[in-house]
Image (cartoon, rainbow, N blue to C red):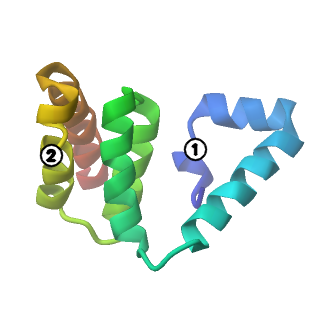
Amino acid sequence: MSDSSEIPAAFKEFGARFPELARAHESVARAVDAAGPLDGRTRALIKIGMCLGAGLESALKSHVRRALAAGASEAEIEQAIVLGMNACGFPRTVAAWSWARQQFKSAAG
């Protein structure tokens, strides 16, 4: 994770309690990112869809912030979310969209 202010408090606390596990997690994340040709913007958009499917609010918010930082537009992020509607259902899609909107507002203000 790039900016420590973006790291959820629970992750910080977990990392303080289990530093070796946090380092291993970060190492795997870097290896996964380097495992193929996708750029950061594309990886973040894909991870948004995965988080929607799994119902992971905190992770989805994190990947929305990462997608914005990597140059994705709000419209691209919204499409990544809407694409999940038929597979994951309307309630999860609306929830994910609302979580993304929170991040858009935070980034704007």
Instruction: Provide the secondary structure element on which disc 1 rests.
Output: loop
The residue beneath circle 2 is 83
User: Image quarter for residue 92?
Assistant: top left
Indicate the quadrant containing the N terminus: top left, top right, bottom left or bottom right: bottom right
Q: Which residue is mark 1?
A: 7
The image shows residue 81 at horizontal and vertical percentages of: 20, 43
Between 82 and 36, the residue placed more toward the observer is 36
Can the viewer see residue 69?
A: no
Residue at figure coordinates x 27%, y 33% from the top left: 99
Q: Earlier in the sequence, mark 2 or mark 1?
A: 1
Query: In the image, is 90 to the left or to the right of 55?
Result: left
Question: Which of the labelled discs sits on residue 94, or is there none?
Answer: none
Residue 71 in sight in this render: yes
Of tags 2 and 1, the one toward the viewer is 2
Residue located at (19% from left, 33% from top): 87
Q: Amino acid at mark 2?
A: Leu
Task: State the residue in front, 58 or 28.
Answer: 28
* Residue 58 higher or lower than 92, as above or below: below
Q: Where is residue 109? Give x, y as percent.
A: 26, 50
Please say if the residues under marks 2 and 1 sit with CB atoms less than 8 Å apart.
Answer: no
Residue 8 vertical placement versus 78 (above, below): above
Residue 62 drawn at (x, y percent): 44, 45
Q: Nearer the viewer, residue 69 or 83?
A: 83
In this view, 63 is above or below 60? below
How packed mark 1 is, by other alpha carbons closer than 10 Å (few <14, some 14-19, many 20 or more), is some
42 relative position to 83: left or right: right
Left/right placement of residue 42 relative to residue 4 reads left
Which kind of residue does numbered mark 1 sit on? Ile
Q: Quadrant of residue 41?
A: bottom left
In the displayed orientation, state which residue is furthest to the bottom: 37
Helix, strand or loop for disc 2: loop
From this view, report whether residue 10 is shown above or below residue 51: above
